[in-house]
Image (cartoon, grey):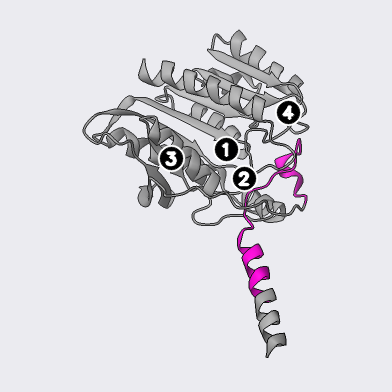
Amino acid sequence: MRRSQVLVSAILVLLSAAAVQCQEHQRPGGRERSGMLQKPAPKVDIGIRRGKFIDFPSASGTARAYLALPDDKNAKHPAIIVIQEWWGLNEWIMQQADRFAKQGYVALAVDLYRGKVATTQDEAHELMRGLPQDRAIADLKSGFNLLAARPDVDPSHIGVIGWCMGGGVALDLTTAEPRLAATVINYGHLVTDPATIARIQTPILGNFGADDRGIPPADVQAFADATRAAGKSIDVKTYPGAGHAFMNPNNKGGYVPEAAQDAWSRIDAFFAKRLRG
């Protein structure tokens, strides 16, 4: 009897340990498209969520998003579209939407994978490769229209932010939606094609890691030079000693607190100027 009790206790300990595993982990300095396997990181407890999931019509079907609202429900607010990493709309992304809502923004995190969330890099790689680009942009543009039509949103002050895959998609949306008022790209893919850059009508802030092998400093500089040459507004910063996903604390071994804090300071000041001014 005693032996069975010990066995049950051991099983409960194992189950408890397994329950704290999470979906969110990235290889320091690694490229998102590598598809390299990695263990999931410990789960981040986001506490009580401010927002809720909603469905809304899109040109590509029914889209889905996490909507977080400010405390003041009787005023018009600026809004921010929050775009996921390649993992999907997971807890960390909802955490960022909640963060913006606490600052007084209406935050909409569009679920580009429509309910799917990766827990390994293989799964993330597969989901990202299977994401139709036209559907992603259609869902995001529909999300913009949803925000613009809300009585609690100032439609002239809607911005977008993304990390990793989402950083690149934020740039894609910027070239497709001229009504955006501010764009933040955090270590996302970039372009130098003059025709694409000519479609940018939005001030851009970018944060990148000097040790990012997927988006090296030379690519960041080329993008910044081409954008400035086209007369666009852009502010980019590359952080020494930081690799890919340096802003995500779940990126064990790759999170750089000092760089992340500085990047957040830049983001908050940029949005305050462009969306509240």
In the rendered structure, the answer to whether residue 74 lies left or right of residue 190 reads left
Is 189 one of the magenta-colored residues? no
Residue closest to the eye, 119 or 201: 119
The numbered dot on residue 98 is 3
Alpha carbon of mark 2 to alpha carbon of mark 1: how far? 7 Å
Earlier-in-chain disc, 2 versus 3: 2
Is 23 one of the magenta-colored residues? yes
Task: Mark 4: give few (<14), some (14-19) or many (20+) Cα within 10 Å.
Answer: many
Count the numbered circles shown: 4
The residue positioned 49% from the left and 17% from the top of the image is 203
Earlier-in-chain disc, 3 versus 1: 3
The numbered dot on residue 166 is 1
Q: What element carries label 4?
A: loop
Residue closest to the eye, 72 or 179: 72
Residue 221: image location, x then y, percent: 70, 16
| Disc number lying in front (2 or 3) | 3
What amino acid is found at the position of numbered circle 2 in the picture?
A: Trp
Q: Can residue 2 be seen in this view?
A: yes
Alpha carbon of mark 4 to alpha carbon of mark 1: how far? 18 Å
Earlier-in-chain disc, 2 versus 1: 2
Image quadrant where residue 206 sits: top right
The numbered dot on residue 86 is 2
Alpha carbon of mark 2 to alpha carbon of mark 4: how far? 19 Å
The residue positioned 68% from the left and 91% from the top of the image is 1
The residue positioned 62% from the left and 38% from the top of the image is 248
Earlier-in-chain disc, 2 versus 4: 2
Residue 68: image location, x then y, percent: 38, 42
